Image: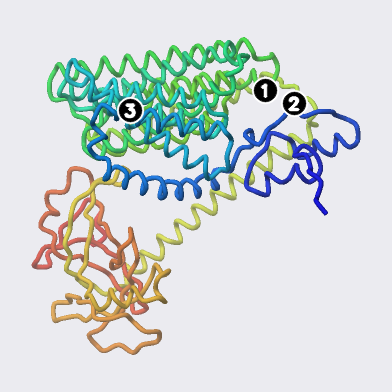
Amino acid sequence: MNTPHTSPHAGQGLNAPAAAGLRTPMPAWWAQAQAQGWVTGSPSGAASPQDEEPSAWLVGVLMVGALLCMLSAMGLLALLLQDLLISGLAWGLALLLWGASVAVMRAGPALFVQCLAVVGVATGSVWLGVLVGDAAHGPVGWPWLLAGVAQAALLGLTALAVRPRWVQQLCGVAAAAWLVLGVLVALAVSREALLAPWAPVILTGLVLLWGLWMARESAWAASPQGATWAALGEGMADGLLGAVVVLASVLDWLGGSASATVATTASSRQGMAVQALGLGAVVLVFGLALLRRWRGDAVPNTRGARWQPLAGLAVGLATAASAAMPWMAPVALMAASAAMRARWRLLGACGVVALVVLSRFYYALSWSLATKGAVMAGVGLALALVLLALRARWRQVPAAADAARTPAAGRTGHRLGWAGVVLGAVLCLGLVNLDVWRKEQVVQHGEAIWVPLAPVDPRSLMQGDYMDLRFDIPPSVLKDLEAPGMALSSWADVVVTLDARQRATVQRLAQPDEALAANERRMPLKRLKGRWTLVTDAYFFPEGGAKPFEAARLGEFRVLPDGRALLVGLSDANGQPIHAPADLRR
């Protein structure tokens, strides 16, 4: 007997999309509410299978399969039809590929077929973009700009033509990426200049245009394509944030970050100052607009009103950070726009990207480590003072939510808070002092042993310059350390032999309760940064004090009979100590 068809809007059919890894706009409680007569129809009109949103994990898995299938087939076709790829028929073939892929997605097929169509759209749009750039005539760099704009426009048309929201957002991400790439490469090629000084400014301009476009959301939200425009805007925001992370990291790695470039001429220093002031001013204007909007919407004597000073503090910090670190400007602008439009997910993403950008401050070579430390300490002190002042203001403004709290409950919560602070401080100080005491015992009672080393000289923001220490560990020991039983271990003990001058050589892995010869000692190995090393992999000294340590050839350790060891200093090839200001051997 045939099973009667069940509508996806009632009964068990409502849960069918969820079982397939899909998210439907229909709430889980809607069917039960319909059965009890509380509601009729559907919560957002007649939902179709095309409105069901797949989970990100499901899309990712299927997209990998689609890439493998489509790229293999297209690679084979490219080999067979390579002459046509650059002929006059290439325009028609590229448009045919793009149009056919869009038509497939509009038909609402299975998710895997949609993924195949997405790969087809991407290939067709890239092909058309290349053809546009190749046909362009004009100044150097003009083809790159036209190719990027053509790609973004074609992806925008794709988003308007298809219904799946995840495809629309993906088109927004790709469109933003191609716009950024086209503009930056065109600028670099035409001006024969590095991307680094201009990249933050270009990103800030693109984010500014995005923010102005999203400010009209209330105007186009009521249109039939309102949801599509919203999805496209969200995708472009994600693409712009991704571009900030990638460009900031890559350009810093290449040594060309605008925040890390040392200005060597008066004109370059003046240009960087103008850039910093301009970016800071733009962020300040947007921040003031945000504060004005919130102040107009805030209800007096509520928690929202009491958060106004903290919002002002955030705007001030964002302005200062944008002036000091250009990559903060596009992130701050997008965060302000997201806060204005109550897009909290995007605001959270901006916070994560801001932390990534702030971490690049580590590599700003135009600032000395001492200056960085002073700035960090000054900012921390200023924030503490401002927060104390805001706390007093917070207490002066009553909140409706606080009226229901009894005085006894307030006093109890206050006491518990201080008790937690005191307990945390005692635990932190106790653990730190216990660790210091244990290391002092090693220094005072340990046997002096020297191990040959091969130093290099990276830097550490918090601790000054340091040498990356590398000790000679025999291949046989390293092979034993990679055994299956040691795969997840981060600690191991080795046996070293001492010569007449107390120079140590690693011999083998130590066994539990192993009896050692008179000239043998037990020392610990650690797995640090993916490699094994004796005790530690770094020796720190003050910034600017690296010159004397260039002669270091030996690491001096103190070792206890139970295997505990500590690096106390570095020595030259003759074993003469190279003293640092805080040397443990004094």
Q: Where is residue 165 in the image (x, y as percent from the top left)?
A: 56, 31
Q: Horizontal placement of 407 versus 286: left or right?
A: right
Q: How far apart are marks 3 and 1 (CA)?
A: 53 Å
Q: Which label lies toward us, 3 or 1?
A: 3
**On the image, numbered disc 1 is attached to which residue?**
303
For the N terminus, the image quarter is bottom right
* Residue toward you, 264 or 368: 264
Label number found at residue 128: 3
* Mark 2 element type: helix
For the C terminus, the image quarter is bottom left
The residue under label 3 is which amino acid type? Leu
Q: In which quarter of the image is residue 316?
A: top left
Label number found at residue 401: 2
The residue under label 1 is which amino acid type? Arg
* Residue toward you, 285 or 197: 197
Colouring style: rainbow
Q: How far apart are marks 3 and 2 (CA)?
A: 59 Å
* Residue toward you, 34 or 554: 34
Tags 1 and 2 touching, CB below 8 Å: yes
The residue under label 2 is which amino acid type? Ala
In the depicted structure, whether residue 98 falls above or below residue 116: above
In the depicted structure, whether residue 36 falls above or below residue 214: below
Residue, x 17% and y 75% (percent of image)?
503
Q: Which label lies toward us, 3 or 2?
A: 3
